[in-house]
Image (cartoon, grey):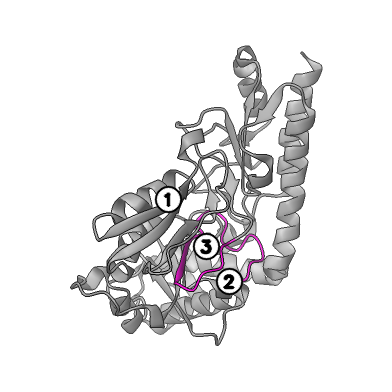
Amino acid sequence: MKKHNFSAGPCILPEEVLQKASEAIINFNEDNLSLIEISHRSKPFVDVIEKARSLALELLGLENKGYKVLFLHGGASMEFLMVAYNLLNKKAAYLNTGTWSDKAIKEAKAFGEVIEVASSKDKGFNYIPKGYSIPKDADYFHCTSNNTVAGTQMKVFPETNIPLVCDMSSDIFSRQLDFEKFDLIYAGAQKNMGPAGTTLVVLKEEILGKVERHIPSMLNYKTHLDKESMFNTPAVFPIYVSMLTLQWLKDLGGISFIEKVNEKKAALLYGEIDRNPLFEGIVAKEDRSIMNATFVLKDNTLTEKFDKMWQEANINGLHGHRSVGGYRASMYNALPLYSVQALVDVMQELERKN
Protein backbone atom coordinates (compact mmCIF):
# COMPACT_ATOMS: atom_id res chain seq x y z
CA MET A 1 0.00 0.00 0.00
CA LYS A 2 1.37 3.40 -1.02
CA LYS A 3 1.99 5.73 1.90
CA HIS A 4 0.11 8.93 2.66
CA ASN A 5 2.91 11.27 1.63
CA PHE A 6 3.00 14.69 3.33
CA SER A 7 6.63 15.34 2.34
CA ALA A 8 7.41 19.03 1.86
CA GLY A 9 9.48 18.47 -1.27
CA PRO A 10 10.42 16.54 -3.21
CA CYS A 11 6.85 15.50 -2.74
CA ILE A 12 3.95 13.40 -3.91
CA LEU A 13 3.24 13.18 -7.63
CA PRO A 14 0.14 11.79 -9.38
CA GLU A 15 0.12 7.99 -9.74
CA GLU A 16 -0.55 8.14 -13.47
CA VAL A 17 2.37 10.55 -13.93
CA LEU A 18 4.72 8.20 -12.10
CA GLN A 19 3.51 5.31 -14.24
CA LYS A 20 4.03 7.15 -17.54
CA ALA A 21 7.40 8.48 -16.41
CA SER A 22 8.59 5.01 -15.41
CA GLU A 23 7.57 3.65 -18.81
CA ALA A 24 9.44 6.46 -20.59
CA ILE A 25 12.63 5.52 -18.74
CA ILE A 26 12.50 2.11 -20.43
CA ASN A 27 10.87 2.88 -23.77
CA PHE A 28 9.99 6.45 -24.71
CA ASN A 29 7.41 6.97 -27.46
CA GLU A 30 7.73 3.28 -28.32
CA ASP A 31 11.05 4.06 -30.04
CA ASN A 32 12.92 1.38 -28.06
CA LEU A 33 15.03 4.12 -26.48
CA SER A 34 14.95 5.56 -23.00
CA LEU A 35 13.92 9.17 -22.52
CA ILE A 36 17.18 9.76 -20.66
CA GLU A 37 19.38 8.49 -23.48
CA ILE A 38 18.03 10.49 -26.42
CA SER A 39 19.39 13.85 -27.58
CA HIS A 40 17.82 16.86 -25.95
CA ARG A 41 17.79 18.42 -29.42
CA SER A 42 15.93 15.52 -31.00
CA LYS A 43 12.37 16.16 -32.14
CA PRO A 44 10.81 13.86 -29.50
CA PHE A 45 12.29 15.90 -26.64
CA VAL A 46 11.84 19.28 -28.33
CA ASP A 47 8.15 18.37 -28.56
CA VAL A 48 8.17 17.64 -24.81
CA ILE A 49 9.67 20.96 -23.74
CA GLU A 50 7.49 22.93 -26.16
CA LYS A 51 4.40 21.21 -24.77
CA ALA A 52 5.55 21.90 -21.19
CA ARG A 53 5.98 25.59 -22.00
CA SER A 54 2.60 25.75 -23.69
CA LEU A 55 0.81 24.01 -20.81
CA ALA A 56 2.41 26.32 -18.23
CA LEU A 57 1.17 29.43 -20.04
CA GLU A 58 -2.26 27.91 -20.66
CA LEU A 59 -2.82 26.90 -17.04
CA LEU A 60 -1.68 30.31 -15.77
CA GLY A 61 -3.88 32.11 -18.30
CA LEU A 62 -0.89 33.87 -19.82
CA GLU A 63 -1.10 32.74 -23.44
CA ASN A 64 -0.48 35.48 -26.02
CA LYS A 65 0.16 38.06 -23.30
CA GLY A 66 3.87 38.67 -23.79
CA TYR A 67 5.18 36.01 -21.42
CA LYS A 68 7.95 33.51 -22.11
CA VAL A 69 8.69 30.24 -20.29
CA LEU A 70 12.08 28.86 -19.34
CA PHE A 71 13.12 25.57 -17.73
CA LEU A 72 16.44 26.16 -15.99
CA HIS A 73 18.84 24.43 -13.60
CA GLY A 74 19.75 25.28 -10.02
CA GLY A 75 16.40 25.34 -8.26
CA ALA A 76 14.71 28.45 -6.91
CA SER A 77 17.90 29.19 -4.98
CA MET A 78 19.64 29.93 -8.28
CA GLU A 79 16.82 32.34 -9.11
CA PHE A 80 17.60 34.32 -5.94
CA LEU A 81 20.87 35.13 -7.68
CA MET A 82 19.63 35.39 -11.27
CA VAL A 83 16.75 37.75 -10.48
CA ALA A 84 19.10 40.24 -8.87
CA TYR A 85 21.81 39.77 -11.50
CA ASN A 86 19.34 40.54 -14.31
CA LEU A 87 17.03 43.11 -12.71
CA LEU A 88 18.76 44.92 -9.85
CA ASN A 89 20.53 47.97 -11.24
CA LYS A 90 20.47 50.34 -8.27
CA LYS A 91 17.83 49.37 -5.72
CA ALA A 92 15.28 46.62 -5.13
CA ALA A 93 12.45 46.14 -2.65
CA TYR A 94 11.88 42.81 -0.86
CA LEU A 95 9.17 41.51 1.46
CA ASN A 96 10.70 39.15 4.02
CA THR A 97 8.21 36.47 5.01
CA GLY A 98 10.30 33.36 5.57
CA THR A 99 13.47 31.35 5.26
CA TRP A 100 13.55 31.51 1.46
CA SER A 101 12.84 35.22 1.10
CA ASP A 102 15.56 35.79 3.69
CA LYS A 103 17.99 33.89 1.47
CA ALA A 104 16.83 35.80 -1.62
CA ILE A 105 17.55 39.09 0.16
CA LYS A 106 21.04 37.91 1.05
CA GLU A 107 21.83 37.20 -2.61
CA ALA A 108 20.36 40.49 -3.83
CA LYS A 109 22.51 42.55 -1.47
CA ALA A 110 25.56 41.60 -3.55
CA PHE A 111 24.21 43.66 -6.47
CA GLY A 112 22.85 46.86 -4.99
CA GLU A 113 20.72 48.44 -2.30
CA VAL A 114 17.97 46.23 -0.90
CA ILE A 115 15.01 47.82 0.86
CA GLU A 116 13.28 45.34 3.16
CA VAL A 117 9.79 46.87 3.06
CA ALA A 118 8.53 44.64 5.88
CA SER A 119 9.49 41.47 7.73
CA SER A 120 7.88 38.88 9.98
CA LYS A 121 11.24 37.59 11.18
CA ASP A 122 10.59 39.16 14.60
CA LYS A 123 8.00 36.43 15.31
CA GLY A 124 9.63 33.51 13.58
CA PHE A 125 7.84 34.25 10.30
CA ASN A 126 4.49 33.18 11.75
CA TYR A 127 2.52 35.89 9.92
CA ILE A 128 2.47 37.88 6.67
CA PRO A 129 3.23 41.60 7.11
CA LYS A 130 0.60 44.02 5.84
CA GLY A 131 0.35 47.75 5.28
CA TYR A 132 3.84 48.24 3.91
CA SER A 133 4.81 50.69 1.18
CA ILE A 134 6.98 49.96 -1.84
CA PRO A 135 9.50 52.55 -3.08
CA LYS A 136 8.42 53.83 -6.47
CA ASP A 137 12.02 54.15 -7.63
CA ALA A 138 12.97 50.52 -6.92
CA ASP A 139 13.96 48.37 -9.89
CA TYR A 140 11.51 45.66 -8.81
CA PHE A 141 9.55 44.26 -5.86
CA HIS A 142 10.18 40.66 -4.78
CA CYS A 143 7.92 38.48 -2.63
CA THR A 144 7.42 34.80 -1.80
CA SER A 145 3.83 33.64 -2.23
CA ASN A 146 3.98 30.64 0.10
CA ASN A 147 6.38 29.89 2.92
CA THR A 148 7.03 26.18 3.07
CA VAL A 149 8.93 26.21 6.37
CA ALA A 150 6.65 28.29 8.62
CA GLY A 151 3.38 27.53 6.80
CA THR A 152 2.18 31.01 5.81
CA GLN A 153 0.80 32.20 2.49
CA MET A 154 0.18 35.58 0.91
CA LYS A 155 -3.53 36.03 0.17
CA VAL A 156 -3.20 39.52 -1.34
CA PHE A 157 -0.45 40.94 -3.53
CA PRO A 158 0.40 44.64 -3.66
CA GLU A 159 -0.47 47.00 -6.47
CA THR A 160 2.72 48.56 -7.77
CA ASN A 161 3.98 50.25 -10.93
CA ILE A 162 7.40 48.59 -10.72
CA PRO A 163 8.06 45.01 -11.91
CA LEU A 164 6.56 42.42 -9.57
CA VAL A 165 8.70 39.30 -9.03
CA CYS A 166 7.40 36.29 -7.11
CA ASP A 167 8.88 33.04 -5.87
CA MET A 168 5.93 30.64 -6.19
CA SER A 169 7.92 27.46 -5.61
CA SER A 170 5.55 25.84 -3.14
CA ASP A 171 2.13 26.93 -4.39
CA ILE A 172 2.48 27.30 -8.16
CA PHE A 173 -0.58 25.90 -9.99
CA SER A 174 -2.45 25.38 -6.70
CA ARG A 175 -4.79 28.40 -6.67
CA GLN A 176 -6.25 30.99 -8.97
CA LEU A 177 -4.44 34.35 -9.03
CA ASP A 178 -4.30 37.26 -11.42
CA PHE A 179 -1.01 36.04 -12.84
CA GLU A 180 -0.86 39.03 -15.20
CA LYS A 181 0.09 41.14 -12.18
CA PHE A 182 3.49 39.47 -12.13
CA ASP A 183 6.39 40.31 -14.41
CA LEU A 184 8.51 37.34 -13.36
CA ILE A 185 7.43 34.14 -11.62
CA TYR A 186 9.79 31.34 -10.67
CA ALA A 187 9.26 27.98 -9.03
CA GLY A 188 11.34 24.90 -8.31
CA ALA A 189 9.65 21.86 -9.84
CA GLN A 190 9.70 19.63 -6.77
CA LYS A 191 6.47 20.81 -5.16
CA ASN A 192 3.58 20.85 -7.64
CA MET A 193 5.27 20.01 -10.94
CA GLY A 194 7.78 17.19 -10.89
CA PRO A 195 11.03 15.86 -9.45
CA ALA A 196 13.83 18.14 -8.32
CA GLY A 197 16.18 19.23 -11.08
CA THR A 198 14.45 21.94 -13.07
CA THR A 199 13.05 25.37 -12.32
CA LEU A 200 10.15 27.05 -14.09
CA VAL A 201 10.62 30.73 -14.93
CA VAL A 202 7.76 32.71 -16.51
CA LEU A 203 8.68 36.27 -17.45
CA LYS A 204 8.03 39.27 -19.62
CA GLU A 205 11.03 39.80 -21.85
CA GLU A 206 10.52 43.58 -21.71
CA ILE A 207 11.84 43.79 -18.12
CA LEU A 208 15.31 42.60 -19.19
CA GLY A 209 18.29 44.58 -20.48
CA LYS A 210 18.08 47.44 -17.99
CA VAL A 211 21.08 46.73 -15.77
CA GLU A 212 24.46 48.28 -16.46
CA ARG A 213 26.61 45.32 -15.40
CA HIS A 214 27.91 42.48 -17.54
CA ILE A 215 25.93 39.30 -16.89
CA PRO A 216 27.69 35.96 -17.41
CA SER A 217 26.02 33.97 -20.18
CA MET A 218 24.85 31.12 -17.96
CA LEU A 219 23.16 33.55 -15.55
CA ASN A 220 21.60 35.77 -18.21
CA TYR A 221 17.87 35.24 -18.83
CA LYS A 222 18.32 36.64 -22.34
CA THR A 223 20.75 33.82 -23.16
CA HIS A 224 18.24 31.17 -22.15
CA LEU A 225 15.39 32.90 -23.96
CA ASP A 226 17.41 33.13 -27.16
CA LYS A 227 18.36 29.45 -26.90
CA GLU A 228 14.87 28.34 -25.80
CA SER A 229 16.18 26.71 -22.59
CA MET A 230 18.78 24.80 -24.64
CA PHE A 231 21.89 26.92 -23.94
CA ASN A 232 23.17 23.87 -22.12
CA THR A 233 21.62 20.43 -21.80
CA PRO A 234 18.31 20.84 -19.99
CA ALA A 235 17.12 18.55 -17.20
CA VAL A 236 15.41 16.13 -19.56
CA PHE A 237 13.64 13.84 -17.09
CA PRO A 238 12.36 16.53 -14.66
CA ILE A 239 11.02 18.57 -17.59
CA TYR A 240 9.26 15.52 -19.01
CA VAL A 241 7.65 14.68 -15.65
CA SER A 242 6.65 18.33 -15.22
CA MET A 243 4.97 18.22 -18.62
CA LEU A 244 3.06 15.08 -17.60
CA THR A 245 1.96 16.71 -14.33
CA LEU A 246 0.78 19.86 -16.09
CA GLN A 247 -1.19 17.73 -18.56
CA TRP A 248 -2.68 15.80 -15.62
CA LEU A 249 -3.76 19.08 -14.05
CA LYS A 250 -5.27 20.34 -17.29
CA ASP A 251 -7.22 17.10 -17.74
CA LEU A 252 -8.61 17.43 -14.20
CA GLY A 253 -9.99 20.88 -14.96
CA GLY A 254 -7.01 23.13 -14.36
CA ILE A 255 -6.19 25.42 -11.46
CA SER A 256 -9.82 26.36 -10.74
CA PHE A 257 -10.63 22.68 -10.10
CA ILE A 258 -7.58 21.82 -8.03
CA GLU A 259 -7.99 24.97 -5.92
CA LYS A 260 -11.35 23.68 -4.66
CA VAL A 261 -9.79 20.31 -3.78
CA ASN A 262 -6.90 22.02 -2.00
CA GLU A 263 -9.29 24.20 0.00
CA LYS A 264 -11.22 21.10 1.12
CA LYS A 265 -8.02 19.39 2.27
CA ALA A 266 -6.84 22.46 4.17
CA ALA A 267 -10.25 23.03 5.77
CA LEU A 268 -10.37 19.41 6.97
CA LEU A 269 -6.94 19.52 8.61
CA TYR A 270 -7.11 23.04 10.05
CA GLY A 271 -10.59 22.26 11.36
CA GLU A 272 -9.16 19.33 13.33
CA ILE A 273 -6.16 21.34 14.57
CA ASP A 274 -8.53 23.98 15.95
CA ARG A 275 -11.05 21.51 17.36
CA ASN A 276 -8.69 19.00 18.95
CA PRO A 277 -7.52 20.15 22.41
CA LEU A 278 -4.22 18.29 22.01
CA PHE A 279 -3.01 20.38 19.03
CA GLU A 280 -2.55 24.00 18.04
CA GLY A 281 -1.46 25.85 14.93
CA ILE A 282 1.64 28.02 15.03
CA VAL A 283 0.89 30.77 12.49
CA ALA A 284 -1.70 33.54 12.27
CA LYS A 285 -5.00 32.02 11.14
CA GLU A 286 -5.58 34.58 8.40
CA ASP A 287 -2.20 33.75 6.89
CA ARG A 288 -2.38 29.96 7.00
CA SER A 289 -1.04 28.17 3.94
CA ILE A 290 -3.33 25.77 2.09
CA MET A 291 -0.20 23.92 0.99
CA ASN A 292 1.81 23.55 4.21
CA ALA A 293 -0.05 23.25 7.53
CA THR A 294 2.19 23.61 10.58
CA PHE A 295 1.10 22.59 14.08
CA VAL A 296 2.38 21.34 17.43
CA LEU A 297 1.29 19.15 20.30
CA LYS A 298 0.40 21.18 23.38
CA ASP A 299 1.84 18.40 25.56
CA ASN A 300 5.29 17.32 24.40
CA THR A 301 5.09 14.14 26.47
CA LEU A 302 2.68 12.81 23.80
CA THR A 303 5.21 13.23 20.98
CA GLU A 304 6.58 9.69 20.99
CA LYS A 305 3.09 8.22 21.13
CA PHE A 306 1.75 10.40 18.31
CA ASP A 307 4.79 9.76 16.13
CA LYS A 308 4.36 6.02 16.50
CA MET A 309 0.65 6.25 15.68
CA TRP A 310 0.97 8.23 12.45
CA GLN A 311 3.88 6.13 11.25
CA GLU A 312 1.87 2.96 11.89
CA ALA A 313 -0.97 4.55 9.90
CA ASN A 314 1.29 4.55 6.83
CA ILE A 315 1.87 8.31 6.94
CA ASN A 316 5.16 9.81 5.73
CA GLY A 317 6.88 13.19 5.95
CA LEU A 318 5.04 14.79 8.86
CA HIS A 319 7.93 16.14 10.91
CA GLY A 320 8.27 19.93 10.89
CA HIS A 321 11.26 21.74 9.44
CA ARG A 322 14.28 21.57 11.73
CA SER A 323 14.12 25.35 12.31
CA VAL A 324 10.47 25.23 13.44
CA GLY A 325 9.87 21.81 14.98
CA GLY A 326 6.46 20.28 15.57
CA TYR A 327 4.65 18.96 12.53
CA ARG A 328 4.13 20.04 8.94
CA ALA A 329 1.58 18.46 6.64
CA SER A 330 2.29 19.44 3.05
CA MET A 331 -0.85 19.08 0.95
CA TYR A 332 0.29 19.60 -2.62
CA ASN A 333 -1.95 19.10 -5.64
CA ALA A 334 -1.40 15.35 -5.97
CA LEU A 335 -2.17 14.55 -2.32
CA PRO A 336 -5.66 12.99 -2.15
CA LEU A 337 -8.29 14.08 0.35
CA TYR A 338 -8.34 10.62 1.90
CA SER A 339 -4.70 11.05 2.96
CA VAL A 340 -5.67 14.14 4.96
CA GLN A 341 -8.55 12.16 6.46
CA ALA A 342 -6.09 9.44 7.49
CA LEU A 343 -4.06 12.03 9.41
CA VAL A 344 -7.17 13.51 11.01
CA ASP A 345 -8.25 10.02 12.10
CA VAL A 346 -4.91 9.53 13.88
CA MET A 347 -5.22 12.91 15.61
CA GLN A 348 -8.70 12.00 16.81
CA GLU A 349 -7.54 8.59 17.98
CA LEU A 350 -4.81 10.24 20.04
CA GLU A 351 -7.45 12.46 21.63
CA ARG A 352 -9.62 9.44 22.54
CA LYS A 353 -6.68 7.68 24.18
CA ASN A 354 -5.75 10.69 26.29
Stretch of the chain drawn in magenta:
157-178
x, y percent for residue 236:
39, 68
Q: Is residue 103 visible?
A: yes
Mark 2 touches mark 1? (CB < 8 Å):
no
The kind of residue tagged 1 is Ser
In percent of width and height, residue 78 lies at: 33, 58
Residue 96 in the image: state x and y as whole percent.
Answer: 45, 49
Query: In which quadrant of the rendered image does the N terminus lie?
Result: top right
The image's mark for residue 21 is 3
Q: Nearer the viewer, mark 1 or mark 3?
A: 1
For label 3, the SS is helix
Report the residue at 56% width, 47% height from top.
Answer: 128
Taking the spot 36% from the left edge, 62% from the top edge, the residue there is 92
Residue at mark 1: 101
Of the pair 34 and 12, the residue shown nearer to us: 12
User: CA gap, disc 1 to disc 3?
Assistant: 32 Å
Which secondary structure class fits the magenta region best?
A: loop
Residue 77 visible, this angle: no
Query: Which of the marked residues, 2 or 1, is nearer the chain's N terminus?
Result: 1
